[in-house]
Amino acid sequence: MNDTLDWLDGHALALDEGDVAAGQALLGRLGRSGLLRVGVPAAQGGTGGSLGDAVDAIAQVARHSLTAAFVCWGQRAFIEYLLQSPNAALRERALPGLLGGEEAGATGLSNAMKFLSGLEQLGVRAFGAGPWTLQGRVPWASNLGTRFCVALAVARDDGAPPFVVAVPADRAGVARSADLDLIALRGSQTAALTLADVPIDDADVIHPVAREFLPRARPAFLGLQCGLSIGLAEAALGAAREHLGPARAVLGTPLTDAEAALAAHRAELLQGLAEGRFLADAPALFRLRIALAQDVQQALQLELLASGGRAYHRDQPLGFARRWREAAFIPIVTPSLSQLQGELAKLAA
């Protein structure tokens, strides 16, 4: 584990800037560290523990590199889909490679989560009555390594309810674009996918009814995602505390308050996941995701103020500029803060 965290410290900037070798090595590193097995039952190849333990594992990675944590989140969310799938054969076939980091799992369900909230139509459609062929486009998917499998919610041309499928990269008709030209997290192997007459059958089905599966998967999808905010905020607050000197003692109280708020939000998240509360109370999880994103912004502001002008120098090894870019991703990762706020406003009305 420590070797992996040390490697992340040494490659955080390279991962953020899109170094190809670092990006290709990342998932294998995470797999060998055991991080992807946290919160997975031992009977399924994991090391046991809870979903909250997996959130903390992602937060631990995010303290060193948000790119790595984002990849870890995508992989771990895909693993969670299989753990919740009734398709035991798919789970038994795919889990070993995913847990070891030899195979990449791309969530691909950003469009689906927006569909669940009535914000978008599904971008991929299935033709036929089983087996099927898929047509459509996924404009953004991450963790698309050489060997990947992407989870998609798919509309059905026969009028049956949408379903959720797993599509491997080597299936005929799957085309991956070049990596998207992002301003940060460029080592996350994020690209667009086009599907042209891609054949699938029952063996590829994660769940036959998307509207049943997605609400059950959402607490894990969003809860694990909150680990990104927790870890990044912890890193920024730790740096602020480290650079806090007598000349900036005035920041002591705001820093303590920010640390307490972050700890409280983390505790509320882990308790809600442990109790299963977010299955019935999705708005509570939405509000926590928003609060944690605000914690990140406050933490980065405090790090900047505590570091002073040094934070603005490119030749200073503070990591602030990278964290500042990383923090810009937190409000827009699906579901974005504006989407969550809109959903809360709709529920309140």
Image (cartoon, rainbow, N blue to C red):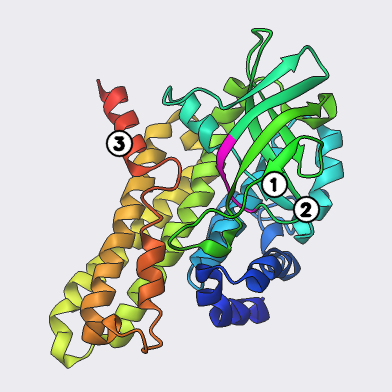
What amino acid type is highlighted by mark number 1? Ile
SS category of the residue bearing label 3: helix
Q: CA distance from mark 2 to mark 3?
A: 36 Å
Looking at the rendering, which quadrant does residue 261 occupy? bottom left
Q: Which residues are magenta?
A: 138-143
What amino acid type is highlighted by mark number 3? Gln
Q: Camera-side residue: 70 or 18?
A: 18
Task: Rate crowding at label 3 as few (under 14), some (14 to 19) or many (20 or more) other CA atoms within 10 Å.
Answer: some
What amino acid type is highlighted by mark number 2? Arg
Placement of 221 over or under 125, stated as above or below: below
SS category of the residue bearing label 2: loop
Q: Camera-side residue: 240 or 255?
A: 240
Q: Mark 2 — residue?
A: 147
**What residue do we see at 44% from left, 49% from top?**
269
Q: CA distance from mark 1 to mark 3?
A: 28 Å
What is the residue that sits farthest to the top in this orientation? 159
Name the spot of residue 325 as percent of width and height, x first. Answer: 38, 65
Name the spot of residue 299 as percent of width and height, x first. Answer: 30, 67
Asked if the residues shown at circle 1 and circle 3 are in contact, with their CB atoms under 8 angstroms apart, the answer is no
Name the spot of residue 329 as percent of width and height, x first. Answer: 40, 55
User: Which badge, 2 or 1, is on the more N-terminal residue?
Assistant: 1
**Residue 294 horizontal side relative to residue 21, left or right:** left
Task: Rate crowding at label 2 as few (under 14), some (14 to 19) or many (20 or more) other CA atoms within 10 Å.
Answer: some
Q: CA distance from mark 2 to mark 1?
A: 15 Å
Task: Rate crowding at label 1 as few (under 14), some (14 to 19) or many (20 or more) other CA atoms within 10 Å.
Answer: many
Q: Is residue 45 visible?
A: no
Give the number of the disc on residue 341.
3
SS category of the residue bearing label 1: helix
Give the number of the disc on residue 79.
1
